Image (cartoon, helix red, strand yellow):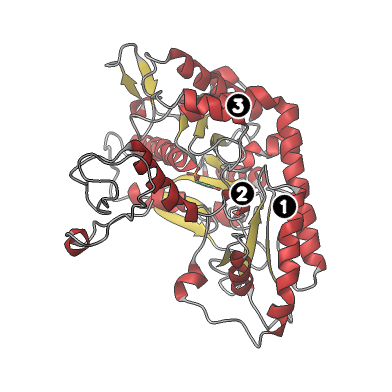
Amino acid sequence: MALHRGAHRSQDSDGERKVAVNPFFGEANPVAGMDTAPPKHRLAETPLPPSTAFQLVHDELMLDGNSRLNLATFVTTWMEPQAGVLLAECRDKNMIDKDEYPRTAELERRCVSMLADLWNAPDPSAVVGCSTTGSSEACMLAGMALKRRWSQRASKRQEGSRYPGAARPNLVMGVNVQVCWEKFCNFWEVEARQVPMEGDRFHLDPQAAADLCDENTIGVVAVLGSTFDGSYEPVAELCAALDALQERTGLDIPVHVDGASGAMVAPFLDTDLAWDFRQPRVSSINTSGHKYGLVYPGVGWALWRSSAELPEELVFRVNYLGGDMPTFALNFSRPGAQVVAQYYTFLRLGREGFRAVQQTTRDVAMRLGERIEELGDFRLLTRGNELPVFAFTTAPGVSSFDVFDVSRRLRERGWLVPAYTFPENRTDLSVLRVVCRNGFSEDLGDLLMGDLESLLPELRRQSGPAERSAAEATAFHH
Ligand SMILES: *Cc1c(COP(=O)(O)O)cnc(C)c1O
């Protein structure tokens, strides 16, 4: 969320910055009159009638984009009306209040069990897990568990000293990780050791990751479904490289899989890919319920293989609301409705339903990628056959326009297709990325193609890429 500043006083003083009120709106305000404008940046002295307040807020929001045409986001933008009813029924439920809402707590518990089973935990009854507000919170929790385990190992090595010497913990990851891992490292003072991109490899290299590990490495993060291009990182190969490292050096480095998107795709479409708890080295996994878990924002999940991977000292026991409940979370209060909606989605679709939905989305992505490739102006970097997401750039020899031009022109037609520059060592490469989600149908794909085809002739006639601001060139939409 943007960090906002208050408004200048002058904007709030009389005669400045008022919300414009149409006299048609609602009942007359008996105190202030029918068309009195409330200030924008401070509380008005008097209330408004509900219909007027509603209309004002409603109208202001008209200029927000149409979320279904947003091909930048991974987050769910369509759910069934029945899910909407459940969400509305549960909007007053506070997730932390497990004693007051024991059934909501039970549904959360069932979701954790279902995910443990889906992610092939050898002993699902040993798995511990929780819901979160999203993958970012889940990654913070998983990272904290890794850090605390390292600190326990290190203090064992250094007998008794809780903070061993001047040792600084580090976390190894690809440079393509989502921003939440940079946040984790910043907030919790962990060194981020990033494997750069190299040539046509746009994510982590297993051997390069193992080479960055030392005795202060708290873990390695593997991303199942890179936000940059939709590719899966090679989890099994990473585990093998870390096995070899352990044989050579004795270092036993745990792996966390950030499956924000892929942990809800691979279990249905890539059942042979052993990316999950089938790898003994994978100690924890997160996913975003609100991405390919098909629930509106915000719900995520964090699971640990067993309580041995989640140090007990991080777990708080909440008992002042009645009952005794172990919790691991950053927030205290949090909406329960999304957890209920996640359970509904699991119940509603089952494995077959999820498989069908995700396969359809993958088919749409792959078909759209092929059609874009057939235009001849573009080169695909990924094809939507892992996450239903693909990245593409301009074909060699295309010099009259660049990816930023394409993004800007598509935006004129209502489509949000982000363009951004890759990180080290491929900062020479700028791409467009399309994220297909449930609800982005073959038909909508046709409409996007139609718009792209109709603006290409103009782009080809340009004498070169349009100038752009520095902000435009570096903006990356996670
Ligand atoms: C989206 C994403 C995150 C952050 O998840 P939120 O649910 O948006 O907080 C973390 N990692 C990856 C790989 C992601 O795609």
Give, as a three-letter code, the residue at label 1. Leu
Q: Residue at x 58, y 70 (%)?
A: 408
Q: Secondary structure at mark 3?
A: helix
Tag 3: amino acid: Gln
Where residue 373 appears, x then y in whole percent? Answer: 78, 65
Q: Answer with the quarter of the image where residue 152 lies.
A: top left
Q: Tell me if mark 3 has few (under 14), some (14-19) or many (20+) residues whose alpha carbon lies within 10 angstroms of its own.
A: few
Q: Which residue is mark 3?
A: 82
Percent position (x, y) of residue 321? 30, 16
Q: Which residue is mark 1?
A: 444
In the image, what residue occupies the spot 51% across and 62% down?
476
Horizontally, is 307 left or right of 455 in the view? Answer: left
Ligand 1 closer than 8 Å to label 3 CB: no
Residue occupied by mark 2:
68
For residue 379, above or below residue 88: below
336 to 321, vertically: above or below = below
User: Is the CB–ligand 1 distance for label 1 below 8 Å?
Assistant: no
Residue at the bottom extreme of this rendering: 463
Extreme-right residue of the structure: 374
For the residue with label 2, is its CB less than 8 Å from the closest atom of ligand 1?
no
Q: Amino acid at mark 2?
A: Arg
Nearest the eye: 415 or 431? 415
Q: Residue at x 36, y 54 (%)?
A: 2
Dot 1 crowding, Cα within 10 Å, few <14, some 14–19, many 20+: some
Label 1's element?
helix
Camera-nearest residue between 88 and 191 = 88
User: Is residue 395 visible to us here?
Assistant: no
Measure the alpha-carbon separation of dots 3 and 1. Answer: 24 Å
Label 2 close to label 1 by CB (< 8 Å): yes
Could you tell which of marks 2 and 1 lies nearer the N-terminus?
2
Q: Position of residue 439 (x, y in %)?
A: 67, 43
Numbered circle sitting on residue 103: none
